[in-house]
Amino acid sequence: MRNRRAKIVATVGPASSAPPMLRTLFHAGVDTFRLNFSHGAHSDHAAVIRSIRALEREEDVPIGILQDLQGPKIRLGRLPSGPRQLENREKISLVLGETTSDHTQLPLPHAEIFASVRAGDRIFVDDGRIRLRVTERGLESLEVEVLSGGTVSDRKGVNLPDTKLDLPVMTDKDREDLKFGLECGVDWVALSFVQTAEDLSDIKALLEGRAGVIAKIEKPSAVADIQNIARSADAIMIARGDLGVEIPAENVPSTQKEIIEICRRANRPVIVATQMLESMTTSPTPTRAEASDVATAVYDGADAVMLSAESATGAYPAEAVEVMDRILARTEGHVDYVKRSDRPRATEHPEDCIARSAARLADELSAPAIVTYSMSGATALRVSAKRPSQPLLAITPDMAIARRLALAWGTRALLEKNVVDYETMVHFARESCQPFVPSGRDDRLVVVAGFPFGRSGSTNNIRIVRAFPKAAGSA
């Protein structure tokens, strides 16, 4: 058991792909490993997946694997004359094509932009370092004014914060990568460039329940439709890199809080990602601001926080995980964290009332643990969303579900395929909770399950059982 409830996601890359380092990172605190399919060959990712599964068998603990698809990338074309300087208030043109010989033009090989952008829309280049505003739109050209100038060069990334693009969310590369990932048994698939809930329909049809889908929130249009996206996705990632380019920086903290609250109400795990301990790519210690940023995500109620370059290419991957683990544990131990861990009232499902009641009952009984039995993981996620004070043990017969629950706040998944009825489940719950119960104490456990037993989506029962029935009487 970790000494904290929020989970850690770490990106695997050249600095962390070797089996000994993967083991080190797991022991340091990683709960789910992220594979970034913007980089690396399939053979490299396959080797990492094999190593993680071997580690999982060795440790006898479910470990999550998150496949992050690249998604569509909007970039400038090639500037044949090399980098050029753009001055404030300069007038230039963006033209459709891979390159151009006119030094007053920038090539943009994306016809979708010319079809969707409107006069007045802003265009950001190179992570927002260069900012343009469209003054006139043509079929294959855009007249723009430079709002913030700088040096522009080949293949720089382009963001369009004011424009909803008619662009396929999944590229041909993504489809090939997804097929490969599913064959390798990944547990989560993260989808980039989500603008509305409808963008998730294709990938959900392809997944067919074989993995959970994570919607990456990177665009203002996704923030505007977050209620529907949270209901449609299985989890949410607040991808603050691109999101922080497309919305004002001062809006990112409040947007993060709002998305986390919406996800909790929808019983969806939510990951806060990007630049959490960025300085630790080159330094063995974080800045104080970074430590505060991680703690803020925990105070906000995030299920998980994510390391990117820090663990993938940084000089101190293990130290970054260790620091994040300590920040999470210290934050959760603070009195203000307990005060902020309220239990939002859900409005859609009676099962949420059961979960909230179980958390409250465990508090009033000073129960050492809450136990759920779940075929799909939904019961565990509902209880997790209520942020109970007690450890949450999720018994499931499905290893795929156990691995997905490695992302859920405060949840330890236990694989047990021999639970065939309610009484067997209660017996296994007692055995599983023994590490949390001092011997001989008349402690009671709170068990959440459903009748008929073993049917997905039937959470309708709370039972209080004694931890030591032989010593203290029957349940």
Image (cartoon, rainbow, N blue to C red):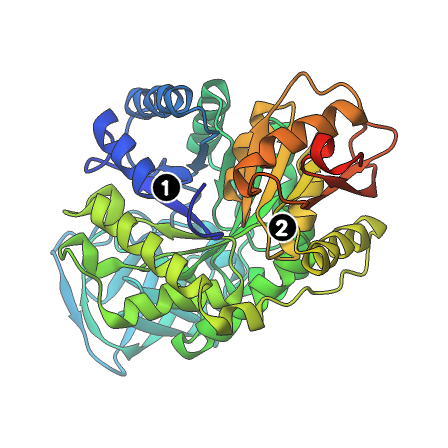
First in sequence, mark 1 or 2: give its number.
Answer: 1
Compared with residue 75, is residue 40 higher up or lower down, i.e. above or below?
above
Q: Position of residue 269 (x, y in %)?
A: 57, 50
Report, in whole angstroms, how far the alpha carbon at label 1 lies from the one at label 2: 19 Å
Q: Residue at x 71, y 42 (%)?
A: 379
Q: Residue at x 27, y 55 (%)?
A: 323
Q: With respect to residue 413, does 398 lie above or below? A: above
- Label 1 amino acid? Val
Residue with the mark numbered 2: 384
Visible residue check, residue 385: yes
Q: Residues within 10 Å of mark 2 (few under 14, many from 20)?
A: many
Circle 1 Cα neighbour tier, 10 Å, few/some/many (<14 / 14–19 / ≥20): many
The percent position of residue 138, horizontal first and vertical second, equals 46, 64
Question: Could you tell whether 248 is left or right of 189 in the image?
Answer: left
Quadrant in which the N terminus is drawn:
top left
* Residue 30, label in figure: 1
| Picture residue at 20% right of the left edge, 56% below the top | 280
The answer to whether residue 206 is above or below residue 118 is above
Tell which residue pokes out farthest to the right in this image: 452
Tag 2: amino acid:
Ser
